[in-house]
Image (cartoon, rainbow, N blue to C red):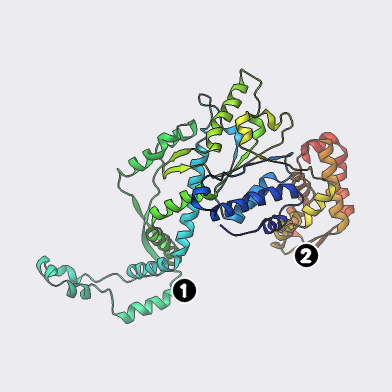
Amino acid sequence: MRRLTPREIVSALDKYIISQNDAKRSVAIALRNRWRRQQVPDELREEIAPKNIILIGPTGVGKTEIARRLARLADSPFLKIEASKFTEVGYVGRDVESMVRDLTELAVNMVKTKAQEAVQGKAHRIAEERLLDILLPQKKEAHTLDRAENEEKPLELVRKDTAEPPSTREKMRRMLRDGKLDNRYVDLEVAERPTPVVEIFSSAGLEEMDINLKDMLGGLFPKQTRKRKVKVPEAMEILTQEEAQRLVDMDKVVKQAIQKVEQSGIIFLDEIDKIAGRQGGHGPDVSREGVQRDLLPIVEGCTVTTKYGMVKTDHILFIASGAFHTSKPSDLVPELQGRFPIRVELKSLGKDEFVRILTEPKNALILQYQALLKTEGIDLEFDDEAVCAIAQIATEVNERTENIGARRLHTVMERLLDDILFDAPDVENNKIIIDAAYVHKKLESIKQDEDLSRYIL
């Protein structure tokens, strides 16, 4: 885990997320506490529970983005899932334990990818030898010898099996590395992807049935391969991937992945306010409270069976979020409330924040559209008044219709640049400047018609 201080974490989040300093501070402290926990004595380490967080605020203010960027900073397995997808046992929906299985699957893929990258050089060298064997087929003189001689003189056979004199093979190797063989085709045996077995059950809450059945049945049938005629560069890529997979120790990968999940996994439970509610005793309210009861052991800490082994959830960090328009955190069952001790309220975004969102972050919207049009050879520029006008219109539309926060900027920008994006390949002028007059001309009529703006903006 990277040893980032809380101040460094907030500074890194500031590059992508505008405002919401309280939420940034809370997640920064939670992440730093994970590192601190690793430094304490062993007997106390297991006793320190993660301080789970509830982010309270309307949609489009940065709740999901904060959690996602935090996971990237920590290089942690991260899973975002809507709490409303889960239902009480007996109702149609997913089993709550499936989130831990999904997180474990993500972690295994993360660790496996890094392990393959680490052996990429060795895999490339082995793949190169295999490709040279295909390009220079071995002589068949050894087949004329009888089996007895074959067993008596193994060293002589190895010498006879050499494909070509070293000079020829090295000459071919140089041609391969120089790209002189790139247009040549070779026949390659490629393993076919196995057809998923009983996958139909996994979405019906029977994940346990899916854990080992596919692996068991998959081993009953021989691996199918098929011949493909591919160019040399593609063949090299396929062979390198095959060799990288063979070089990776999957037992070690699984062990590291489970440790990663248990010690640094982050689960983001979105829309937790949709399952809040304790007063009702019939209909959907029963299921809502049932989901909370099912979530409770996962958040408190339990052991979940996955196809990679047992995974403990005691130290997974849970970040929940919700708008809480019609409910409040106190509507959650008391036991679940107690497992989310940190509560942060995120502020609604206004014109000033929208101006900053359009221009300041590393992935600012204006930068994205400039990069897209740069591919067509067009330089797109926005003057300051145009940026203010866009922010003002987005704010007004949010106030008059549904407040969807910064997501409103996406709809406004798409509508504003619709003609430019359509005509870009045919435009001769390679520089376009967007000013306030253009913004008002394109958007004012839509903004004034409330019914129209409700559908278009």
**Camera-nearest residue between 60 and 132:** 60
Q: Is residue 408 left or right of residue 191?
A: right
Q: Which residue is mark 1?
A: 179
| Nearer to the camera, 155 or 109 | 109
**Residue 108 visible in the shown view:** no
How would you rate the neighbour count of disc 1 (Cα within 10 Å): few for under 14, some for 14-19, many for 20 or more? few
Look at 84% across and 48% down and name the residue there: 351
Residue 196 image offset from top left, x and y in percent: 41, 41
The quarter of the picture where the N terminus appears is bottom right
Q: Label 2 sits on what residue type?
A: Asn
Left or right relative to 70: residue 444:
right
Residue at the spot of label 2: 430
x, y percentage for residue 81?
A: 59, 40
Residue 431's spot in the image, x, y percent?
80, 64
Q: Is residue 391 left or right of residue 245?
A: right
- Residue 138 vertical placement versus 283 (above, below): below
Front residue (pair 289, 152): 289
215 vs 369: above or below: above
Name the amino acid, label 1.
Gly
For the residues marked 1 and 2, what is the alpha-carbon distance in whole angstroms? 37 Å
Left or right: 153 as drawn, with respect to 444:
left
Which residue is at the front of the view, 457 or 105?
105
Q: Position of residue 169 (x, y in %)?
A: 34, 77
Q: Measured along the vertical axis of the image, is residue 271 above or below residue 251?
A: above
Q: Secondary structure at mark 2?
A: loop
Q: Earlier in the sequence, mark 1 or mark 2?
A: 1
